[in-house]
Image (cartoon, rainbow, N blue to C red):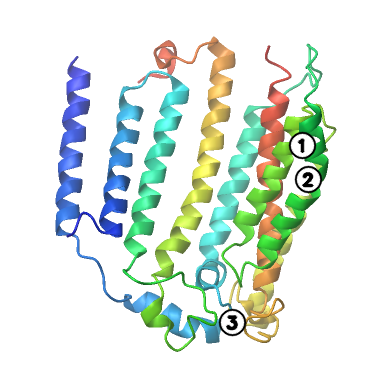
């Protein structure tokens, strides 16, 4: 009883403070100086039309490195928690419908291709490594929905993840050696503004990030699928 | 401020989502429901950060034929909060996956999802 009252009181106080925040909030009319710098100088310094990508990959590359690391650690923790010894299902599962099978055969290559398209064009269109990786992981969910017993190799995904993560770091270090600093995209020529092969190393970096995120999310899904074999 | 502008509505919904999420975290007993509370809270925070980047009449920060390099400063929304939210969403996914797998592990130990059962981890 006291606990419930305490929770209500806390929520009321928070709600009131949020309300006063909202009341005094003024909509901004212009960009702040830092955003202004990114918007004005970004196209010349980085060469990417998508300014969000320019910020995520180059200006704040360390953030992205940390983000990829967090995702890696969480995938590793999920793998540790859900470790299964007995990988054989104790009961038979009903096979899924013909519609799902046909749709999976038709859609799987298209979804993988769409994911690759999204992360290759991350510097031109709204998209990028994380979004493309999520689309690839969705394709894996479709495969597992169609047949939970699909022989998908964990090791292949682990290898893909390690290789792409390592290449990402190598590109970052190359930036120190050849250009202005860690993860600098000037190690490759900037090219023509708005082309696929432009913006220096950004398409390369985002491709590796996309492969890494796609394989990490897929391995989380594979682990969650495998754990069902243990429980009844 | 005007509560019925796009920004006002988004900020209000974001704050309401935060309150709902916090209520779920504090009052629910089922572990899965607590995790749902965390994700609602997370989405509320993300919505607020994106809403703060919004400016009336401005468009996405991508330079093309409509938004040229020279007039981009007056035409695009703030790109920094959008980049931060991109990071926050991915981290949210990772945290949710860890919470769910830990819940599975706890369920295997006690065969219950009620938080009252796990008394030995209470301090």
Q: Are marks 1 and 2 in contact (CB under 8 Å)?
A: yes
Q: Look at the numbered disc 2 and give the secondary structure of its residue.
A: helix
Chain letter of mark 2 equals A
Image coordinates of residue B24 in percent, x first then y, are 34, 28
- Tell me which corner region of the image, top left, top right, bottom left or bottom right, holds residue B27: top left
Task: Confirm whether residue A168 shows in the render.
Answer: no
Q: Is residue A159 left or right of residue A168?
A: right
**How many numbered discs?**
3
Identity of the residue drawn at 70% across and 49% down = A136
Q: Are marks 1 and 3 in contact (CB under 8 Å)?
A: no
Check disc 2: other Cα within 10 Å, few if <14, some if 14-19, many if 20+. some
Circle 1 marks a residue in which chain?
Answer: A
Label 2 – label 3 distance at C-alpha: 33 Å
What is the number of the mark on residue A108? Answer: 2
* Mark 3, residue position: A47
Are there few (<14), some (14-19), or many (20+) residues within 10 Å of tag 3?
many
Chain of residue at mark 3: A
Question: In the displayed structure, would residue A130 be above or below residue A75?
Answer: below
Q: Residue at x 73, y 50 (%)?
A: A111
The quarter of the picture where the N terminus of chain B appears is bottom left
Q: Quadrant of residue B17?
A: top left
């Amino acid at each position: 009883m006291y606990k419930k009252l305490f929770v209500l009181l806390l929520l009321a106080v928070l709600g009131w403070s949020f309300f006063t925040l909202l009341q005094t909030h003024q909509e901004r009319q212009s960009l702040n100086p830092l955003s202004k710098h990114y918007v004005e100088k970004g196209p010349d310094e980085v060469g990417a039309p998508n300014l969000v990508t320019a910020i995520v990959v180059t200006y704040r590359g360390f953030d992205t490195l940390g983000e990829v690391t967090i995702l890696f650690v969480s995938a590793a923790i999920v793998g540790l928690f859900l470790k299964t010894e007995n990988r054989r299902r104790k009961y038979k599962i009903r096979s899924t419908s013909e519609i799902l099978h046909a749709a999976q055969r038709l859609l799987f290559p298209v979804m993988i291709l769409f994911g690759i398209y999204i992360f290759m064009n991350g510097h031109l269109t709204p998209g990028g490594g994380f979004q493309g990786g999520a689309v690839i992981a969705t394709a894996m969910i479709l495969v597992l929905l169609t047949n939970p017993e699909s022989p998908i190799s964990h090791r292949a995904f682990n290898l893909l993840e390690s290789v792409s993560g390592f290449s990402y770091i190598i590109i970052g270090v190359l930036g120190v050696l050849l250009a202005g600093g860690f993860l600098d995209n000037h190690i490759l020529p900037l090219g023509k503004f708005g082309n696929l092969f432009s913006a220096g190393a950004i398409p390369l970096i985002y491709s590796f990030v996309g492969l890494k995120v796609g394989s990490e999310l897929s391995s989380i899904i594979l682990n969650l699928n495998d754990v069902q074999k243990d429980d009844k | 401020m005007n509560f019925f502008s796009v920004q006002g509505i988004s900020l209000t919904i974001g704050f309401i989502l935060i309150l709902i999420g916090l209520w779920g975290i504090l009052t629910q007993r089922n572990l899965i429901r607590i995790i749902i509370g965390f994700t609602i809270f997370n989405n509320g925070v993300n919505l607020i950060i994106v809403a703060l980047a919004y400016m009336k009449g401005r468009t996405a920060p991508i330079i093309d034929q409509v938004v040229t390099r020279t007039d981009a400063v007056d035409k695009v929304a703030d790109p920094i909060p959008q980049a931060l939210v991109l990071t926050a969403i991915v981290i949210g996914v990772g945290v949710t996956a860890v919470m769910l797998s830990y819940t599975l592990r706890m369920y295997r130990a006690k065969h219950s999802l009620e938080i009252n059962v796990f008394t030995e981890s209470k301090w």
